[in-house]
Image (cartoon, helix red, strand yellow):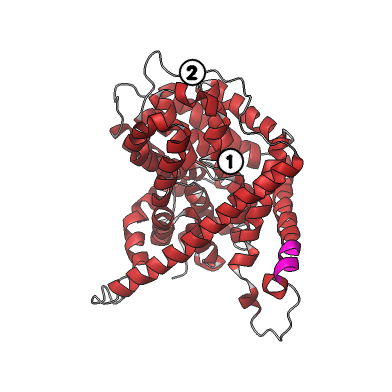
């Protein structure tokens, strides 16, 4: 029988609390989308069962994980060719600490270049476009979205939050205010395919089926973003529903053009990630140095990590995390919001397997798998301001609500995963017991 317990009940409670919080921010509290709520959550549950609930599902997930391993191995060959022993090639010196050979800039970031180029090539060959249209059709039929909105939502699963609006650029001026808000929220609630594989690689050592969980996390957070956006900014009567013919303005002249432009786009992502990591990690260290000047609290020095742990622990608990682990999980959530999801994945991957239960690690993977962080506010305003300058003021008026909804959307996805039977995800009784007794 599937294992079910109080942690699952916590997650169900969390779903209700998050929906209530968004309803309290609604611009029209009399218009709660009941059928959309059922449809969106139903789609999320259906997708979770499709990926994890059948004997064939594990074979699919194994293939996804094998694909990530193959991409990482192939990328390592290119990295070693350019950087030699710095990129993991044959070492010219005697190595005393093998763990010191892992250099983030050479082992993880180059993978983003390869995935970005591969995504562009698959788009040019129409493979990724067909997959996207399939999800667009699903969202259109199950959640009543207009064709343009459905396509934008589906595209966000694989492309970035600024690349996705380019796909429906011809329809941007025709979108209603609610549809613009929805596009923003879904963009913040999902991640790009180029970074998805990097996150899976970071978690590979501590989370079984890491690649499958990251993929599913980005997929199911799309309908969560749709739901929360429509609760906060409901569609008005007679607006929305722009029909798209699914002919995208995102095109490449040839396969070589796709690879070249995809690589260039990936390079921009790598440069941005590198710069952000340097700056934010430095800022955290600076803040901790300043906080260290104050007297100790409860026998320990003050730090940004301790503050984030306390503030976000209740949110981690309602997602379905046991209270014993809520502060560790809360720190991961706070890191995601303030220091980007990339830093949060690095922090999550660095937690030893014995210091966090597999269930909590799995839920945190879903909760932080989205672009909703403070830095993304500027990216959203700038990107959409270029694509639709006539609606820049409208975007500015909605962006902070979109950040809230996008952040809560990934947490809602995590809570829905937490509400499902634990054995669906291969959590054995031993692992579930470990969730209640965590090493201190």
**Disc 1 packing (10 Å; few <14; some 14–19; many ≥20):** many
User: Can you give x and y, in whole percent of width and height, for residue 333 in the image?
Assistant: 42, 54
Residue 74: image quadrant is: bottom right
Foreground of the two, 53 or 2: 53
Report the magenta residues as a range: 76-83
Marker disc for residue 354: none
Q: Give the answer, above or below, for where 268 lies relative to 225.
A: below
Residue 428 seen in the figure: no
Q: Which residue is mark 1?
A: 159
Q: Nearer the viewer, residue 359 or 212?
A: 212
How far across and down, in percent of the image, does residue 158 sit?
60, 40
Question: Which residue is painted at 36% across and 28% down in the image?
Answer: 233
Q: Report the side of 341 relative to 95 (left or right).
A: left
Q: Which residue is mark 2?
A: 241
Q: Are marks 2 and 1 in contact (CB under 8 Å)?
A: no
Q: Residue at x 36, y 61 (%)?
A: 309
Q: CA distance from mark 2 to mark 1?
A: 22 Å
Question: Eyeballing the image, is 372 above or below 38?
Answer: below
């Amino acid at each position: 029988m599937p294992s079910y317990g109080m942690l699952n009940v916590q997650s169900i409670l969390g779903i209700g609390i998050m929906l209530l919080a968004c309803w309290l921010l609604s611009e029209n509290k009399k218009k709660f989308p009941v059928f959309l709520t059922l449809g969106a959550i139903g789609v999320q549950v259906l997708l979770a069962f499709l990926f994890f609930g059948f004997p064939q599902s594990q074979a699919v997930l194994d293939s996804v994980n094998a694909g990530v391993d193959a991409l990482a191995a192939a990328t390592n060959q290119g990295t070693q060719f350019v950087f030699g022993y710095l990129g993991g090639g044959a070492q010219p010196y005697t190595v005393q600490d093998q763990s010191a050979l892992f250099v983030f800039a050479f082992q993880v970031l180059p993978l983003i270049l390869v995935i970005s180029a591969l995504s562009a090539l698959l788009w040019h060959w129409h493979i990724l476009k067909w997959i996207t249209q399939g999800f667009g059709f699903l969202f259109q039929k199950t959640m009543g979205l207009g064709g343009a909105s459905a396509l934008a939502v589906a595209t966000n699963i694989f492309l970035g939050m600024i690349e996705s609006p380019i796909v429906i650029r011809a329809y941007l001026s025709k979108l209603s205010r609610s549809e613009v808000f929805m596009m923003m929220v879904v963009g913040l609630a999902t991640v790009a395919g180029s970074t998805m594989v990097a996150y899976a690689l970071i978690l590979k050592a501590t989370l079984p089926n890491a690649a499958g969980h990251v993929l599913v996390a980005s997929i199911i957070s799309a309908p969560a973003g749709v739901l929360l956006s429509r609760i906060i900014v409901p569609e008005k009567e007679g607006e929305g529903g722009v029909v798209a013919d699914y002919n995208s303005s995102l095109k490449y002249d040839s396969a070589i053009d796709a690879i070249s432009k995809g690589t260039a786009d990936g390079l921009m992502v790598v440069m941005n990630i590198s710069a952000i990591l340097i700056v934010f990690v430095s800022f955290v260290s600076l803040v901790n140095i300043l906080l260290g000047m104050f007297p100790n609290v409860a026998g320990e020095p003050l730090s940004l990590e301790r503050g984030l742990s306390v503030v976000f622990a209740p949110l981690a608990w309602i997602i379905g995390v046991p209270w014993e682990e809520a502060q560790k999980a809360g720190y991961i959530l706070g890191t995601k919001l303030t220091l980007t999801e990339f830093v949060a994945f690095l922090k999550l991957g660095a937690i030893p397997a014995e210091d966090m239960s597999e269930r909590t690690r799995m839920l945190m993977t879903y909760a932080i798998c989205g672009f909703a962080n403070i830095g993304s506010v500027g990216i959203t305003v700038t990107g959409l301001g270029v694509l639709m300058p006539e609606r820049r003021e409208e975007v500015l008026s909605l962006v902070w609500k979109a950040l809230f909804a996008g952040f809560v959307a990934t947490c809602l996805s995590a809570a829905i995963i937490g509400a499902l039977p634990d054995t669906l995800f291969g959590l054995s009784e031993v692992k579930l017991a470990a969730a209640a007794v965590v090493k201190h």
